[in-house]
Each structure stands twice: as structure tokens, then as C-alpha cells.
């Protein structure tokens, strides 16, 4: 199958009626133990958010099925949101470089979850 061209915000269009959530780009991820912000390359593929140190080393994944996605308030958390996978053992803090970029990522993640939610656990997306 031929690869569909991506729009400027990374969303792939298959045809004029179907929009497939498939976004990729650089975000900052807060480290689990030191709480420092580290740049990482992210790829949204259906219900998986994959990430790694660069475009060729995308080795880790966040399962989005049943996850809670929430925008974070606060001056030090500008353009930040959280993803807590089903089961809630860990919460991932992600940060974009701008408000439009943050909104695009949250919207793409929420769109992917809505499309895949049939027959799965509920998913929460909270955008303010």
C-alpha cells in the first residue's frame, strides 16, 4: 500500500473523508526519577505512543487504551499534559514547545482513542 502524504501538523490523510491519527515529532518528557525534562522523539500510531532518543531509536511505548490524558495547569508546567495508562502505575509528563503544538498533540491522541474506544475500557481526555 502506498504511504499517504502527511499534512503540516503530522496527521496523515488517506482520503478526503478519513483522517488517521499518525503524528510524530519532538516533545520533552519528564524523567521518572530526577524529574528533569529530556527531549524525545514521539510517534503516535493508533493506540500506542512510541518514543525514543531520536527518530531511529523509538523503542519505548505508552499504551493509550484506557488511558487518562489531562492538560496540566501552572506557570512551571506551560504546554504540559499527562498520560496515565490504564492501571495508573505511572504518569507520563509531556511538554510541547508552544500552545498550538500542545493542542495538536492532545487532539491527535484523543482522536486516536475515540476511534479505537469501541469495545475497550473508557478513555478520558481533559483539555481546558
Image (spheres, helix red, strand yellow):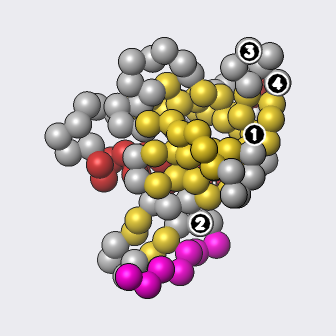
- Please name whichever residue, 57 or 64, is drawn nearer the observer in this view of the structure: 57
State the residue position of label 3.
33
Residue 69 belongs to magenta span: no
State the residue position of label 4.
36
Q: Main secondary structure of the magenta part?
A: loop
Residue at the location (58% across, 75% down)?
7
Pointer 2 and pointer 1: residues touching (CB < 8 Å)? no
State the residue position of label 2.
10
Give the class, few, some or many, for how many residues have Cα within 10 Å of label 2's Cα (few <14, many ≥20). some
Q: What is the CA distance from the residue labelled 4 to the residue labelled 1?
A: 9 Å
Tag 4 secondary structure: loop
Of labels 2 and 3, earlier in sequence is 2
Give the class, few, some or many, for how many residues have Cα within 10 Å of label 1's Cα (few <14, many ≥20). some
Q: Is residue 81 visible?
A: yes
Where does the image place residue 45, in percent across and percent down from the top left? 47, 55
Give the class, few, some or many, for how many residues have Cα within 10 Å of label 4's Cα (few <14, many ≥20). few
Q: Is residue 103 visible?
A: no
Pointer 4 and pointer 1: residues touching (CB < 8 Å)? no
Residue at the location (76% across, 34% down)?
78
Of labels 2 and 1, earlier in sequence is 2
Camera-side mark, 3 or 1: 3
Magenta residues, as a range? 1-8
State the residue position of label 1.
28
Amino acid at each position: 500500500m502506498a504511504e499517504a502524504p502527511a499534512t503540516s501538523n503530522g496527521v496523515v490523510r488517506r482520503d478526503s473523508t478519513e483522517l488517521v491519527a499518525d503524528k510524530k515529532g519532538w516533545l520533552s518528557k519528564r524523567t521518572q526519577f530526577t524529574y528533569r525534562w529530556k527531549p524525545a522523539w514521539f510517534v503516535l500510531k493508533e493506540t500506542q505512543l512510541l518514543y525514543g532518543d531520536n527518530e531511529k531509536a523509538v523503542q519505548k511505548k505508552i499504551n493509550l487504551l484506557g488511558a487518562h490524558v489531562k492538560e496540566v495547569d501552572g506557570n512551571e508546567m506551560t504546554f504540559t499534559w499527562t498520560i496515565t495508562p490504564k492501571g495508573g502505575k505511572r504518569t507520563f509528563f509531556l511538554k510541547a514547545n508552544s500552545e498550538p503544538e500542545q493542542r495538536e498533540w492532545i487532539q491527535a491522541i484523543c482522536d486516536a482513542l475515540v476511534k479505537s474506544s469501541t469495545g475497550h475500557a473508557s478513555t478520558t481526555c481533559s483539555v481546558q
